[in-house]
Amino acid sequence: MAARRQPVEFEDFLPLMVEKLGEEGLMEELCNGFRLLMDPRRGLITFDSLKRNAALLGLGALGDDDLRSMLREGDSDGDGALSQWEFCVLMVRLSPDLMDHHAFAAGFMS
């Protein structure tokens, strides 16, 4: 019998970051995170760049299927990679507490 994999849990720090940094500060930090993970030649987060840099985010234990799933979750244009915009939208979407912060979510998603 195969063991069930436990879902990856994370602490949602984005609402605290908005509180401390403001909306512009949060967006700047998200852009910094994107640059950390992206493939510098393509300017996108690819499977290879995510796999290479996953440990920097504490995600080194994730398997290839999990990493591909993360990419698919945010890949709105179907190119198999994340642009900076797709990455930022994904991060905000994955933050339920931030989405409850209506003023930020409304401004970001417009």
Image (cartoon, rainbow, N blue to C red):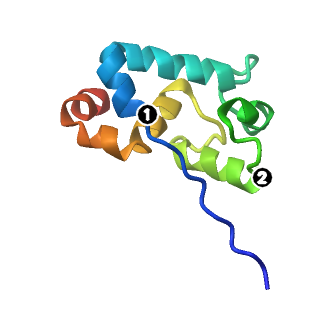
Residue that carries the numbered disc 2 in the rendered image:
63
**Mark 2 surroundings: few (<14), some (14-19) or many (≥20) residues within 10 A:** few
**Left or right, residue 58 beside residue 93:** right
Label 1: which secondary element: loop
Q: Quadrant for residue 32, please give it.
A: top right
Q: Quadrant of the N terminus?
A: bottom right
Circles 2, 1 touching at the beta carbon (< 8 Å): no
Q: Which residue is mark 1?
A: 13
Whether residue 69 is situated above or below residue 37 in the rendered picture: below
Residue type at mark 1 is Phe
Name the residue nearer the viewer: 87 or 22: 22
Near mark 1 (Cα within 10 A), the count class, few <14, some 14-19 or many ≥20, is: few
Quick one: 27 or 47, which is closer to the camera? 27
Decide which of 59, 68 is in the foreground and name it.
Answer: 59
Disc on the earlier residue, 2 or 1: 1
The image position of residue 22, as x and y in percent, is: 31, 16
Q: Secondary structure at mark 2?
A: loop
Q: Is residue 76 above or below residue 103?
A: below
Say whether residue 48 is left or right of residue 93: right
